[in-house]
């Protein structure tokens, strides 16, 4: 696959996953059509040309070299590192990206720095070792529906929902900390679905995050979208309390 080089890798972030983040790939083959906020930002900044360009991921060839230098300088300031904000660390169909992600996580763990990850791909379960170095890592997937037709429309090139869930459940069964991001959660005028079924499907995780769908005109056209999201937050909060699952609402 194509590659690029960068001058820096680790950066501090003030958003929800802080403290530090790594984006070791430019672009994302999943091509999500919510639309994808990361693609919009990269296009506005002139880093990509268009959607097709965005879907041609480029790996950062000097990522490990940069990590070795930067982690020594920043180690005392880092509480944990998130992979990734503007790409996917376990991009579906890209073994080279997954391998680099695992190596980055390994090297950060060796410095006693835990990692959080979020993917719409499939975790390579058999390549992931659970030990004292990895026990504080948190592995997450995005699931906003159980409907494959919806997934094909909005996440056309990502892994199937069934495969994502299966891999995450395997990690949980092997003792890894797991979480699910219910974001961006769609309004009923986009898809009518039973939130209970989604929550039941992910009830094995340690934590659930919930966030509304942004940058989509259909949401604002749903007359009661504010009331809808409020009711969903209340429902999720009660579900998590009952099932002893941590919850975070954006």
Image: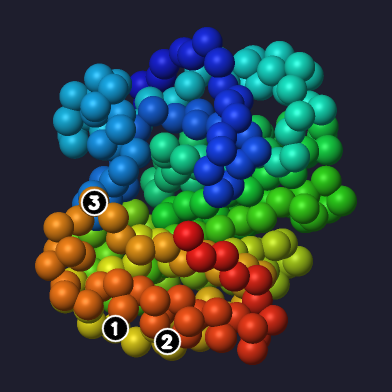
Tag shown at residue 193: 1
Residue at 77 percent of width and 53 percent of height: 136
Q: CA distance from mark 3 to mark 1?
A: 21 Å
Image location of residue 90, percent across then percent down: 49, 46
Q: CA distance from mark 3 to mark 2?
A: 26 Å
- Where residue 233 sits, quadrant-wise, is bottom left
Image location of residue 75, percent across then percent down: 78, 27
Select label 3 or label 1 by which is in front. Answer: 3
Tag shown at residue 215: 3
**Can residue 160 be seen in the rendering of this structure?**
no
Badge 1: how crowded within 10 Å, few (<14), some, or many (20+)? some
Residue 31 placement, left or right of 171? left
Image location of residue 152, percent across then percent down: 22, 63
**Quadrant location of the N terminus?**
top left
Badge 2: how crowded within 10 Å, few (<14), some, or many (20+)? few
**Is the C-beta separation of discs 3 and 1 under 8 Å?**
no
Q: To which residue does mark 2 refer?
A: 197
Q: Give the secondary structure at mark 2.
A: helix
Residue at 53 percent of width and 43 percent of height: 15
């Amino acid at each position: 696959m194509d590659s690029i080089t960068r001058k820096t890798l680790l950066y501090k972030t003030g958003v929800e996953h802080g403290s530090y983040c790594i984006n070791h790939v430019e672009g994302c083959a999943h091509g999500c059509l919510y639309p994808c906020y990361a693609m919009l930002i990269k296009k506005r900044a002139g880093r990509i040309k268009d959607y097709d360009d965005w879907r041609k991921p480029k790996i950062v060839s000097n990522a490990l070299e940069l990590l070795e230098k930067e982690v020594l300088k920043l180690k005392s300031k880092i509480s944990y590192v998130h992979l990734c904000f503007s790409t996917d660390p376990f991009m579906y169909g890209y073994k080279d990206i997954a391998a680099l992600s695992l190596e980055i996580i390994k090297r950060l763990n060796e410095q006693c720095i835990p990692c959080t990850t979020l993917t719409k791909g499939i975790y390579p379960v058999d390549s992931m070792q659970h030990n004292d170095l990895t026990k504080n890592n948190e592995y997450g997937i995005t699931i906003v529906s159980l409907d494959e037709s919806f997934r094909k429309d909005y996440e056309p090139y990502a892994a199937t929902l069934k495969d994502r869930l299966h891999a995450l459940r395997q990690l949980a069964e092997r003792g890894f900390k797991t979480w699910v991001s219910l974001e961006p959660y769609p309004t009923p005028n986009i898809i009518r679905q039973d939130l209970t079924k989604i929550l039941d499907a992910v009830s094995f995780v340690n934590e659930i995050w919930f966030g509304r769908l942004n940058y989509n005109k259909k949401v604002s056209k749903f007359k009661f979208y504010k009331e809808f999201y409020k009711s969903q937050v209340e429902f999720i909060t009660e579900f998590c309390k009952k099932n002893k699952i941590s919850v975070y609402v954006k």
